[in-house]
Image (cartoon, helix red, strand yellow):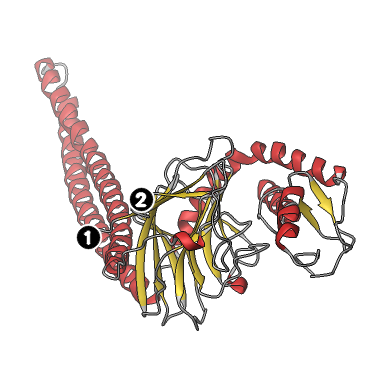
Amino acid sequence: ICCQLQMSQITLSEELLLCPICLDLFNLPISTPCGHNFCKECIQGYWEIAELPQCPVCKQKLSKGPEFKVNTLLSELATQFKKSSEDFSSINDRLHWINEINQTAGISRENAAREIQDCLQLFQKLFHMVQKGQEDLLEDINSKQMQVELKARGMVVALEQEIDTFVQKRASDHHHFQVLSTSTRACLQPAVYVGAMSRAVTRVAGELEETVGVHVKRLYETEIQRARQYAVDVTLDPDTAHPKLILSENRKQVHHGDVALKLPDNPKRFYPGVSVLGNEGFSSERFYYEVLVKGKTEWDIGVGLENVSRKGGNMLNPENGYWALGMRGGQSYWALSSTPVSLPLVKELQRVGIYVDMECGQVSFYNVDVASLIYTFTGYSFSQRLFPYFNPRRNQNGTNSAPLIILPVDV
């Protein structure tokens, strides 16, 4: 409980130390007169394209060409948090297992009820098997116990008769010892039957647990296979790409470069956010595609509305028209809602499936490699076309240079 409390405190501290523009820990933070804080590079990039200097959060207008000093206290807090968060990596490993249980709870009620019914039937069969074995065992033990008692009584009578003639019949001693040895073996037989039954129950219980695990995995595999029926061909739209993003020739891959390309600054292009949209928007009831994130330490992927803001602060959450998943620092995963939700996954993500059901108002993310659900946004209404959204994040001196890759889907 103590460890869980400390982790909740760290999560709260990290939210306070996130830049509202890049959603990352502050880097050289500065404070505006209205009391909001931003990374120096982020706010300068925002002011370069703004008609009038203003706060990206509260929109308060500022004096022309404001110059602010770095908030050394906030900068030191961000640095100390980065160091202290490493101490809780072992706790995150254990929380990963909790996430697996939480993900299982996301199964639809109808399918969950069916799985529970199957499990109950298996347990009932096991219970009846154990009950029947117990009855047979008790009957067998009682029968053998009666036989042992009858033999013992007969032996006592025989021994009493032979005591009178003991001296004359020494030769019969060996026979008596054999009879006693035989009765001892008979008394031990019930314990042997009990041990055999106990081992059988343990084996059946292990097989039952394995069967339940297989059924849960098969359920997720069925969900993903059903989603793949709505697979669409996604390519990247170069007219929306940030000037430092490099797209492959087939427009299936994107990564962050060091030099900005000389491109026209059209209204569709993202800046300063290093993002790009898919070339085609979707208004159909359902669609699905897969993205490879292997080898990257930071990224954001998901979907966005057609009219999302392309300029200035690009805060990813459903209120701003984005439904996205993100990775930070090579180890933490986040569902980017109005309050980002930490996702302590057990295994590193590589192949991510994105499934959108516009009629039901939900966006789901799947770990395709292990057939499991990562996170689902539910309860939304989509009044416009949705476009696939990609943000490979900055390459960070080569540590995050791997591309985001749109994969072909096997139906």
Rendered position, 392 above or below 36 = above
Mark-to-mark CA distance, 1 and 2: 69 Å
Residue on which disc 1 sits:
132
Question: Where, quadrant-wise, is the C terminus in this rendering?
Answer: bottom left
Q: Secondary structure at mark 2?
A: loop
Badge 2 crowding class, 10 Å Cα cut-off, few under 14, some 14 to 19, many 20 or more, is few
Q: Residue at x 68, y 53 (%)?
A: 11
Residue sitting nearer the eye, 121 or 296: 296
Residue sitting nearer the eye, 191 or 207: 207
Q: Where does the image place residue 298, in percent across and percent down from the top left? A: 54, 47
Q: Quadrant of residue 193?
A: top left
Q: Quadrant of residue 410?
A: bottom left
Residue on which disc 2 sits:
249
Q: Residue at x 21, y 35 (%)?
A: 156
Labels 1 and 2 touching (C-beta < 8 A): no
Badge 1 crowding class, 10 Å Cα cut-off, few under 14, some 14 to 19, many 20 or more, is few
How many badges with numbers are in the image? 2
Three-letter amino acid code at disc 2?
Glu
The label on residue 16 is none
Q: Secondary structure at mark 1?
A: helix
Residue sitting nearer the eye, 161 or 51: 51
Three-letter amino acid code at disc 1?
Lys
Q: Residue at x 55, y 52 (%)?
A: 243
Q: Which comes sooner in the sequence, label 1 or label 2?
A: 1
Residue sitting nearer the eye, 49 or 189: 49
Q: Where does the image place residue 402, in percent across and percent down from the top left? A: 45, 41
